[in-house]
Image (spheres, rainbow, N blue to C red):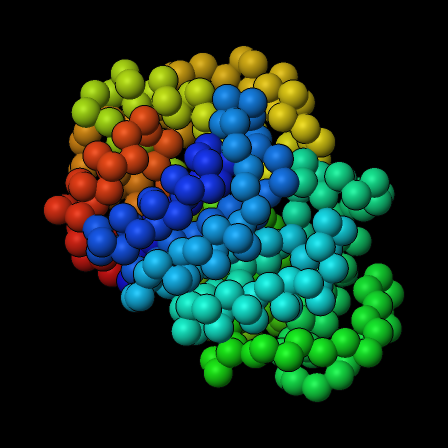
Amino acid sequence: MKVGFKLMAEAFDPKEIVRQAVAAEQAGFDFVEISDHFHPWLYSQKHSGFAWSMLAAIATQTSTLQLATGVTCPIIRYHPAIVAQAAATTAVLADGRFTLGLGSGERLNEHITGAPWPSAHIRHEMLREAIEVIRLLWSGGYQSYEGKHVTLDDARVFDLPDELPEIVVAAGGTNAAEIAARSGDGLFTTEPDADLVTAYRDAGGSGSRFCEVPMAWAPDVDSALKAAHSTFRFGLTGWKVQAELPNPINFEAATSLVRESDIADAMSCGPDLDAHVASAKEFVDAGYDHLTLLNAGPDVDGFLEVCRTDLIDRVRSLA
């Protein structure tokens, strides 16, 4: 069992994100996972720094901490060749401590180029081709590729790490779980959904299974609920909404009727570590072995301290 810490790049400025990563290593986390967005979900989050710059800084300021994107969309906003180069460079800087999380994206971040936002099955086709291009470039030498959606012309990534990153693929349904099994090295989800693990395994997947465990720690329940409602209520909309809305103002509208009581029903809130461990156990029981703790509470350092002294070990023991 590996326990990670979610770096919410939409909720903190880039320097603070790097500081949190260093503090997470000191607290005893196995890895950190950073979101790769162009926009925040909500205006109340206020930030959305460039993930790859932060990863580079984290790589050079840590020594044992594993790093991961959670997740990068290698289509539309990025060409997969750029992702291949960025991931390879990050792995070099981190001495191999890097996992590339990939997914088919959200309109929130990808529409900015003015390209059409395709339907989910087309995005899945594009994702499969993007993974093929990334692996091709990581094989060394000059490479070209002519796919249905992606073209690569005589390109080479010169700086490759000694150990190539694993690719874990985000899945919100069984089709994407099958892509994770057939094209990726692992699975990434945000729900304690055993059916996704089953679909992944039935399609031949046998790698790491990453997930995000939402919780809101604070010394009292009320402040935990208020903080989570302010910055994380978008998480209650579900992926069919999250993938389709174009801007924070749309998420503000979509979440206008979300109440603090809805937050309380959706995640563990407050100082009770037993409740937070019980939340993590749902994911372990569903078959996940890389648990990323996502704290939507108001006190990052307080949360890291309870993780250092108690919570990380208790979550690890669930294995």
Q: Position of residue 20 (x, y in %)?
A: 33, 44
245 is higher (above) or lower (below) than 3: above
Question: Residue at (24%, 27%) from the top-left corner?
Answer: 218
For residue 252, side relative to residue 92 (left or right): right
Quarter of the figure with the N terminus: bottom left
165 is higher (above) or lower (below) than 216: below
Quarter of the figure with the C terminus: bottom left
Q: Is residue 200 visible?
A: no
Question: Residue at (64%, 79%) from the top-left corner?
Answer: 158
Q: Is residue 130 visible?
A: yes
Q: Position of residue 217 (x, y in %)?
A: 27, 31
For residue 58, side relative to residue 43 (left or right): left
For residue 78, side relative to residue 15 (left or right): right
In this view of the protein, which residue sits in the foreground, 266 or 160? Answer: 160
Question: Residue at (30%, 66%) from the top-left corner?
Answer: 64
Q: Position of residue 315 (x, y in %)?
A: 23, 51
188 is higher (above) or lower (below) than 301: below
